[in-house]
Image (spheres, helix red, strand yellow):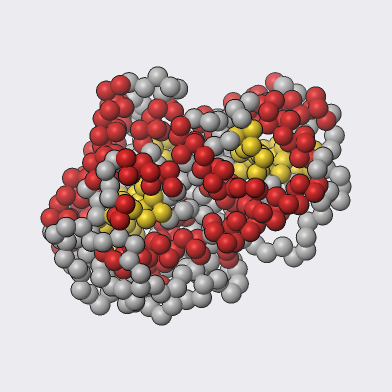
Amino acid sequence: MATPGRRTEYRFGVPRKAPARPTSVSRNDPLPFAPAVTQCHACAVSPGRGERPVRARRPHIAIVIANLPAERDRRVIRECLTLEAHGYDVTVIAPRGDKSLRTLPNSRNTRLKPYPVFVYGSGVLSFATEFVWSFLWVAFRLAGEVVRGRAQAVQVCNPPDVYWPLALVFRALGRPWVFDHHDLCPEIYRTRSEGRPNRTMLRLLEAMEWLTLRTASAVVATNESFRDNALRRGVPAGRISVVRNGPALAEIAPLAEPVPDPPADGVHRIVYLGVLGPQDNVRGAVLAAEELIRLRGRTGWTLTIAGDGECLSELKELVAGRGLGDVVTFAGWLDAGQVDALLQEATVAIQPDLPTRMNDLSTMAKTVEYLGRGVPVVAADLTETRRTAGEAAVYVPTGAPEEFAAALHALLDDPRARARMRTAGRARFCDLLAWDHQAKAYIDVWHALLARRGAGAAPVSTVPAQRRPIAEQPVDVEAS
């Protein structure tokens, strides 16, 4: 997470509300992990029809992001370093963030080709303007890469789902086009419209998603639900690879000594880590804290809300209005080291996302952060949350505040259950969820599409030997 303060929220590449405090990132600042992958010769997908294998000493891949600067997208950073470790050159085209950056921090030579962003208003016209602006700049940057003999293949990350015409052009040129599916745009719209979407707009977004999926040489899905969605849209199973989102093992700071449970001071710490948006239902966590007072009294626990977003002021007013200021605190937007410190002291974490269709299909990256530190989780019973957390979470049926409060109350009184959940969560992270395990599936996609099986840099260790210092970059805790 970035340093505390108001954060810029990007909507399809455009900063909204007040500008964020700039995050200073030097190109020499080390990232917290080496790409934890090994050379692999297996194929995850097959090249699309009519695409010729690219034969080059160092194949060059262009990665397109439209909703935030490259240095703030942790998933893309991991992908770039993984590609570099296997002998690929990479260029990232994204909205401009830190103007001093020319290459991705700590990369060998991943080039940044930013484009300018402007602040627009709200409404359909604003969205359309943003789409057109982003599309034209991306097309211009990609054309420049082609003219310079680069961009032998392209990976595009959504939202938005507007780049499929460029996919047709690149595939006609025999250059693979990979779609890294970060968000279900129709479901985002459905959620934002509070269950009352404009039918025409919804059908348009569904059509754009269909075209984006069907025109890609390969689809990288962030979980099984996204894979199922691509299958329903008609993408052949052989073109879909699941690459989950989450930190590498070396990104999690090791504990110098076990944190005592119960805490030495007798105060249990409940934690929420993430974005404070309307769809995140952090209000539900605050109301659960109010209900928990009735069950436990005002002593023996606190709730720390770490993050920023458009609902921050509203949440602070809610806390003050309900007289919860002595048990609910706001930590702001934290850097990675502060996240480590916060979660290592946490007794339990809360994921208050309500059971909407969007949330049911999405993996909450904050949950993976919780599991990586061995923090037990209380969450609504969502399909992908259960697939992610398994036995490391307690699930409530509807996500009502009284349900969360009852589950927290029971868990705070059961140290044995917490110990079992800590062990289960850490095991799921180390054995399945960490980027160390996801990188293999990701690099297989490119080995297959570019016919570069086994070529590139020498293999690196499966697990990085040590944690390296981290630059003050944001920890990605949104849905993936």
Q: Quadrant of residue 42?
A: bottom left
Write the residue at 41% across / 80% down.
458
* Residue 95 in sight from this viewpoint: no
Write the residue at 65% across / 48% down.
392
Q: Quadrant of residue 409?
A: top right
Write the residue at 70% across / 21% down.
321
Q: Where does residue 375 sit, x and y in percent of width and height?
A: 68, 50
Q: Is residue 163 above or below residue 202?
A: below
Q: Is residue 331 above or below residue 141?
A: above
Relative side of 291 to 183, left or right: right
Relative side of 166 to 415, left or right: left
Relative side of 68 to 365, left or right: left
Q: Is residue 319 above or below residue 247?
A: above
Relative side of 11 to 134, left or right: right
Write the residue at 47% across / 76% down.
460
Q: Where does residue 271 sit, x and y in percent of width and height?
A: 68, 42
State the residue in front, 132 or 163.
163
State the residue in front, 33 or 99.
33
Q: What is the count of numbered marks?
A: 0
* Residue 376 in sight from this viewpoint: yes
Q: Where does residue 278 sit, x and y in percent of width and height?
A: 52, 29
Q: Is residue 334 above or below residue 252?
A: above
Q: Where does residue 232 sit, x and y in percent of width and height?
A: 32, 40
